[in-house]
Amino acid sequence: MGDRVSISFRHGKDESVAFFSHWDGRDLVKAAQKYARALKVLADSKGEKGVIMPLDRMDPGTVMVDFIRVYTKKMKVVDSNYYLGATCNDGDNSDNGHWTIDLETGDTDE
């Protein structure tokens, strides 16, 4: 048994790869929403100062890489719980489905 789920990040028409978890279920979704909202606040404040870094542009692929870094920070080795797919159909998210996090709002589309 698992608590399978996948997420991706979207900004405008661009969408990241899908990040799959076998065990984290909706906790992964909540963490991604929290991360996206915090990132938006940070990016907005940097934009006001005129300093824009690649992550500040909210490129979904870059955001996904940084989210994985933040989310797995406490792990010494990333275990088999996590994997990537080009789309939400490239893995098993049968328990909780796929969630797309909008980088403008932090809201999700299931």
Image: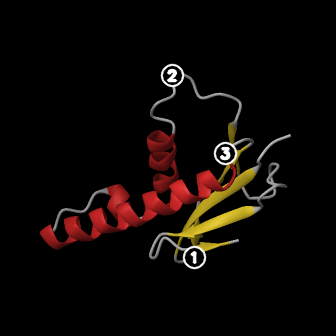
For label 2, the residue is 76
Position of residue 102 measured from the top left corner of the image (x, y, whole percent): 53, 72
Q: Which residue occupies the foreground of this view, 89 or 20?
A: 20
The amino acid type, in three-letter code, at marker 1 is Lys
Residue at mark 2 to residue at mark 1: CA–CA distance = 35 Å
Q: Is residue 80 visible?
A: yes
Assign a secondary structure to mark 3. loop
Q: Give the crowd class for mark 1: few <14, some 14-19, many >=20 residues within 10 Å.
A: few
Q: Is residue 94 left or right of residue 108?
A: right
Task: Estimate the spatial distance between the alpha carbons at disc 3 and disc 1, rounded to whole Å.
Answer: 27 Å
Q: Residue at x 45, y 60 (%)?
A: 34
Q: Is residue 40 left or right of residue 31?
A: left
Picture residue at 50% right of the left edge, 43% below the top: 71
Image side of residue 7 versus residue 102, left or right = right
Identify the residue under disc 3: 24
* In the rendered image, the vertical position of residue 89 relative to residue 2, given as above or below: below
